[in-house]
Image: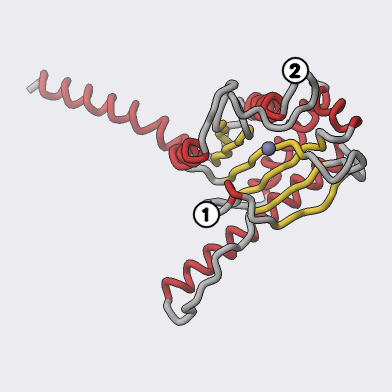
Amino acid sequence: MITGLKNMIRVLIVLIWLTVPLSAAAAGHVLVIDPAHGGKDAGVKLSRTVHEKDVTLAIAKLVKKNLFNAEDIQVWLTRSDDRDVSLAQRKKVLEEAGADIFISLHVNAGFGQKAEGYEVYYLGATIPSAQKDDSREILKDMEQTRRLNNSVLLAQIVQKEMGRVFPRKGRGLRDAPVHLLQSLAMPAILLEVGFSTNIEDRKKMRDTKVQKSVADALTRGVKEYFLTGGAS
Ligand SMILES: [Zn+2]
C-alpha cells in the first residue's frame, strides 16, 4: 500500500516535471529566423572574405541573444552555423518549432551601384479560392486573409524600426512571390538588409555595430508585433 502510494507520487512528480516546461513553452510565442544561404551557398559577396551568409547569420544570432531572456518569445534559427540547409530542411524547422512568425534575412544586389537601403517583403495572398460557396473554402480564404494582414502588420512594424536605424533608406513594403514565403502557414516577412552592390551599404553590413542595430530593430519589431496582438 505504502509502496504503491510512493510509486504513485513518483509517477505524479515525473508527470508534473514533464508537463510544466511543455505548457510554459506552449504559452509563449515562437519566432523562427532564417539566416539565408550557408555552407557552399555563400550568397552575394560583400568583401573578399565576407558574404551574405555571414551577415544573415550574425544578425539572426544577435536577435536570438537579445530575446534569450524574454519569457514569452522563443527564438529558433533555421541554421546556427555555416552549413548548407535545404529549403525542405528550413521548412521542417518551422514545423518543429510551431512557428508563429517567420523572418527570412537576405542581402540585396543589383539595380546598379546607386541602389541602396533595405526592403521588407511580406507573404502575399497567392492562392485565389475558386468556390466561395463551399464553407471550407470560405474558412480557408479567411485564414489566408488573416495571415496576409498579419504579415503586412509585421512588415510595417519592422519597416518602421529599420527606419530608425537607416533613416530615409527604406525602399518600401513589397508583396512578392518569394519562393520560401509561399505556402507557409504563418505570417512571414523577408528583410533585404542592404545592397552588396552599393559601397556604403556593403561597408555598413560588415560593421558589427550596424549588425547589432539591425538585430535590435528586429527585436523591437517582434516584441511590438506580439504586443499589438499580432498572432500566428
Ligand atoms: Zn539571399
Q: Quadrant of the N terminus?
A: top left
Residue identifier under label 1: 183
User: Type of residue at label 2?
Assistant: Thr
Query: Percent x, y for residue 144?
Result: 55, 63
| Residue depicted at 33% across the width and 29% down the height | 18
Q: Residue at 54%, 46% (x, y): give it.
A: 100
Can you tell which quarter of the image residue 221 is in?
top right
Where residue 113 appears, x then y in whole percent? 90, 39
Residue 49, disc: 2
Among the 4 quarters of the image, the one containing residue 223: top right
Q: How is the image coloured?
A: secondary structure
| Mark 1 close to ligand 1, CB under 8 Å | no
Give the residue drawn at x 63%, y 52%.
Answer: 230
Secondary structure at numbered mark 1: loop
Q: At numbered mark 2, what does the secondary structure look like: helix, strand or loop?
A: loop
In the displayed structure, would residue 10 be above or below residue 103?
A: above
Whole-Å distance between the Cαs marked 2 and 1? 35 Å
Camera-nearest label, 2 or 1: 2
Count of residue discs: 2
Q: Say which quarter of the image contains residue 38.
A: top right
| Whole-percent x, y for residue 210 in the image | 82, 27
x and y percentages locating residue 110 in the rendered image: 81, 42
Q: Residue at x 86, y 32 (%)?
A: 201
Residue 73 in the figure: left or right of residue 120 = left
Above/below status of 212 relative to 185: above
Q: Earlier in the sequence, mark 2 or mark 1?
A: 2
